[in-house]
Amino acid sequence: MGLKIAIPKETAANEKRVAASAETVKKLKDMGALVMIESGAGEAASITDETYKASGGTISKGLEDLYKNADIVLKVQAPNENELKSIPKGALLIALLAPYSNADLVSNLARAGINAFAMELVPRISRAQSMDVLSSQSNLAGYKA
C-alpha cells in the first residue's frame, strides 16, 4: 500500500474550503495513495462523502481512524491544538501555517515531531506556479467578491 493521506474537516471559523477536491482525491488514489477523508470534510464546499467515495477516497470513522498511521495530512488552515495532538509523529502536514506570526504552532509542531510545509511560503516563480497557493486563493476570493 502507498502513502496514507488524511484530509480532515477544517476547524477554523468560517472556513468553507477543503484541502482536496474529489478530482484531487482521484489523482492521488491513481498514484497509489490511500486517501482518508473525515466525514463531512467537503460539506461546506458542496462535496459530499459519496462524491469522495466515488473518486476512490475512504471516509474515516472519526479523527482517530483518520490520523492513524497517516503519512501526510492535507489542510487549508493550521490545525488546532486537539488536531495537533492527533497527528502522528513523523507525518508531513501541508497547510497554510503562517509560521512567522504563529511561533507557538511552529514550536508545537517541532516538539510533536511533525514535519510541515507552509504553502504560503512556496516561491512565486514560474517553476512552482502549479503550487502557488497565494495566487490561486486570491483568484478565488476575487470570484467570490
Image: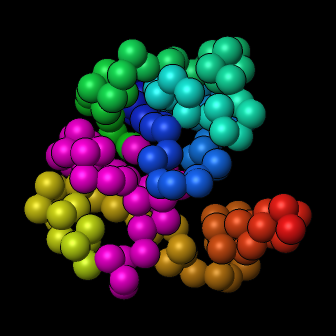
For the N terminus, the image quarter is: top left
Whether residue 78 is in magenta: the answer is yes
Q: How is the image coloured?
A: rainbow
Nearest to the observer: residue 125 or residue 5: 5
Residue ID at (55%, 33%): 41
Nearest to the observer: residue 112 or residue 125: 112
Residue ID at (34%, 61%): 116
Residue ID at (33%, 39%): 71
Whether residue 113 is in magenta: the answer is no
For the C terminus, the image quarter is: bottom right
Q: Is residue 82 left or right of residue 28?
A: left
Q: Is residue 120 left or right of residue 3?
A: right
Residue ID at (57%, 81%): 123
Residue 61 location, x and y as percent? 39, 16
Residue 97 location, x and y as percent? 42, 68
112 above or below 47? below
143 above or below 67? below
Q: Residue furthest front?
A: 13
User: What is the magenta range?
Assistant: 73-102
Q: Is residue 14 visible?
A: yes
Nearest to the observer: residue 8 or residue 16: 16
Number of numbered discs overlaid on the protein picture: 0
Nearest to the observer: residue 57 or residue 41: 41
Residue 64 location, x and y as percent? 27, 26
Residue 129 location, x and y as percent? 71, 71
Q: Is residue 55 visible?
A: no
